[in-house]
Amino acid sequence: MKTAKGERLLPYFLIFPTFLFVAIFTVYPTLRATVQSLFRQRLNIAKFREPTFIGLANYVDLFKDPQFITVLTNTLIYVIGVVPISVVTAFLFAQIVNRKLKGIGVVRLALFHPSILPLVSAATIWMFLFTPDYGLFNTALKLFGYHGPENWTANPRLALVAVMLVAYWKNAGFYMIFYLAGLQNLPAGVYEAARMEGAGPIRIAFSITLPLLRRTTLFVSTIAFITAFQAVDHVFVLTSGGPSGKSSILLYYLWEQRFVNLDVGRSSALTVILIAILLAFTVSNFVLSEQKEAGDD
Amino acid sequence: MTKALPLIRRGLLAAIIIILVVVWVAPTIWAFVASTRPPTEPVSRGDVWFGTHFSLASYAKAFSLAPFGRYFFNTVVLVVMVFVVQAVTVTLAAFAFAHFEFPAKNFLFMFILLQLMIPTTALLVPNFSTIRFLGIYDTILAIGIPYFGSAFGTFLMRQAFLGIPRSLVQAGIIDGCSWWQLLIHVYLPPTVPTLVAFGISSVNWHWSEFLWPLIITKSSEARPLTAGLVRFTQLGEIGARWSLLSAATVIVILPLLIAFLVFQRRFIQGFLHSGLK
């Protein structure tokens, strides 16, 4: 087929708008952050206003800073605390709601609805649950005779837990729908066979359902990890990273370094670290899923 | 005995389900109930749910303390603007990738998919400088512009377009359709549901986004609901006045919940699509 010159260029014109926005707001800023992370630039200190090349000093300083180590530890606790529990809950929820019962649609909606709420409003709702004295948590705990820490979000040991609970409540139902879709695509025949052999529900879950849904688990875990590193809105509402940095996590700290401390160099280094972590998860998910696919054949 | 056992098991299951549902919806229901408490009655031990009478005064008070009407308007403008632009950019790019063969096609596709690997949220520091440079700081446009191109949407629509039978496309070409006629009459009609599903997740995401709008706006003229809500929680008058805070929260979430109840299936499809490989 002969094509005019305009025709040959057409696909590039069609792609151009998307290409342009990705170039300006994804590729360029990634490169820019990488370069700026090698410079000292602090907007609130006159002699450091102009960028000076300092090599890897921003990174070295970060890892020497006990505050950053606290942030990393918090992030690790947050991610390791939220991700596995949400994914396991999602799997259990899906098992529970994957049956034909009257009103099961309402149950699914109830478990799923927090996922459509903005994280900030999930947090403003939960603020009340964590409130001292008459908050729901303390009221519930008092029923069991517990009169411990009153103010969840201001307690150094509980602030991070409070933040994690909100994320858990918001996301478990979201991951549930992926498991539900996975469960509904499973072949019914395998289950018949297993039941005939006398396998109980727990045995079936572990030796049939979970292995068959491993791709779902891989996918759900990856988005759960990525979400955990990106979501800090509830930290703003509930704790502002406090008390004394005890609930500050990576992205919150990044924001603080740039927009409170006006430290461009350090916040750029943090951006690079965050991107590296996120890329590590996406790439390993990709590699793992390719591997499993090869193993399936 | 053999008959009683399944009955007990079914009863147990029902009990577990009911407890689960109650626990899961309690926070949201509480927000709705608390927002109808008269604003002058503080919540205290023992009456965390209901005030003396039903009242909508907390809403009026919330609207008078902060320009929620304006925030609401900004959010609606934002989500509509972002989706309208995305619908165009995404459809055109996906059409190019699905319909044409051209040099550097794979490279360009991978280039766009970078946006899926490096989330825009993580790039707020350098993007802040870009927005300053472009001179659009503190505008609704600034909140939306980084999302005008969407790798996720391009990917989804390309998948949908690839699902269209080649024979249909060939027939269109034989009939002498130009490229845009092919797009509008052959490619788009069967894939509108995918576009709608993408639109729902886009609208939900931009309605909910907080951190980027927080740093890129400073005035009520541009600030969306989420940033407005957080600002509201920090007002001195709010303190522990839970009815006001709940009313403000409901203002932010009610449209989403209504849309969700109306379009349940499409919502869930929209979210599930993000799981397609």
Image: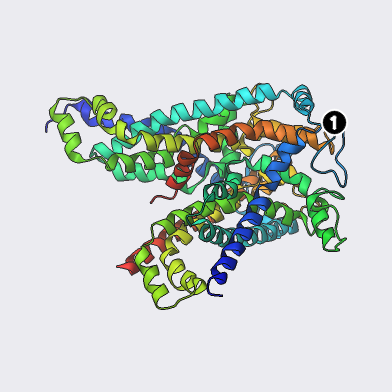
Q: SS at mark 1?
A: loop
Location of residue B112 in the rendering, given as x and y in whole percent from the top left corner:
40, 41
Location of residue A216 in the rendering, given as x and y in whole percent from the top left corner:
45, 59
The quarter of the picture where residue A286 lies is bottom left
Q: Residues within 10 Å of mark 1 (few under 14, many from 20)?
A: few
Q: Could you tell me which residue is drawn at 58 percent across and 33 percent down?
A: B258
Q: Is residue B69 above or below residue A181?
A: above
Location of residue A139 in the rendering, given as x and y in whole percent from the top left corner:
83, 54
Q: Could you tell me which residue is drawn at 28 percent across and 43 percent down?
A: B163
Q: Could you tell me which residue is drawn at 72 percent across and 58 percent down?
A: A70
Asked whether, in this view, residue A252 is left or right of residue A136, the answer is: left
Q: Could you tell me which residue is drawn at 42 percent across and 61 percent down?
A: A215
Q: Nearer the viewer, residue A108 or A267?
A: A108
Residue type, label 1 = Glu
Asked whether, in this view, residue B166 is left or right of residue A18, the answer is: left
The residue indicated by pointer 1 is: B237
* Colour scheme shown: rainbow
Can see residue A274? no
Location of residue A284 in the rendering, given as x and y in whole percent from the top left corner:
46, 61
Residue extending furthest bottom?
A: A197
- The quarter in which the N terminus of chain A is drawn is top left
Can see residue B56? yes
- The quarter in which the C terminus of chain A is drawn is bottom left
Q: Chain of mark 1?
A: B
Asked whether, in this view, residue B109 is left or right of residue A118, the answer is: left
The quarter of the picture where residue A21 lies is top left
